[in-house]
Amino acid sequence: MVKKLSEMKPGESGVVRATLGEGWMRKRLLDMGVTKSAPVKFVRRAPLGDPIEVTLRGYALSLRKNEAECVEVEAD
């Protein structure tokens, strides 16, 4: 099932299918390693819902909710 990274729940994992967005936002995500076929695991969400923490390529990454909405994930 394909869903946005921002829609995932803690403990879920999957593989990045696409990095959407335009301009600086897409470049920022790609620079952080959010590329196609990268395995990703959703770790936790902040109490107010922003930011979220994921594990990607062996490191912890915090993303804002609007950044996470630009990433499509094929959930396991």
Image (spheres, helix red, strand yellow):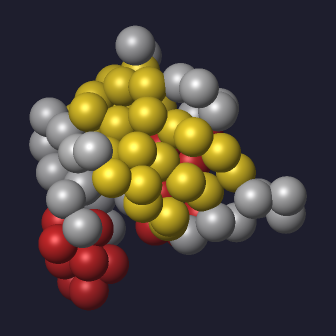
Say which of 45 and 19 sits in front. 45
Left or right: 16 with respect to 60? Answer: left
- Quarter residue 53 falls in: bottom right
For the point 64% across and 33% down, the residue is 10
Residue at 85% x, 58% y is 47
Where is residue 49 shown, x and y percent of the image? 76, 59
Say which of 47 and 69 sits in front. 47
Q: Which of 23 and 73 is in front in this view?
A: 73
In the figure, is residue 31 to the left or right of 62? left
Q: Residue at x 40, y 45 (%)?
A: 55
Residue located farthest toward the bottom when viewing the structure as drawn: 24
Residue 26 visible at all: no
User: Which residue is at 19% across, 59% downward?
Assistant: 33
**Can you give x and y, in whole percent of width and height, for residue 40 in the image?**
35, 37
Where does residue 59 sit, x and y in percent of width and height?
Answer: 33, 52
Q: Is residue 76 visible?
A: yes
Q: In this view, does 44 lie to the left or right of 60?
A: right
Q: Quadrant of the N terminus?
A: top left
Of residues 28 and 55, the one nearer the viewer is: 55
Q: In this view, does 28 lie to the left or right of 48?
A: left
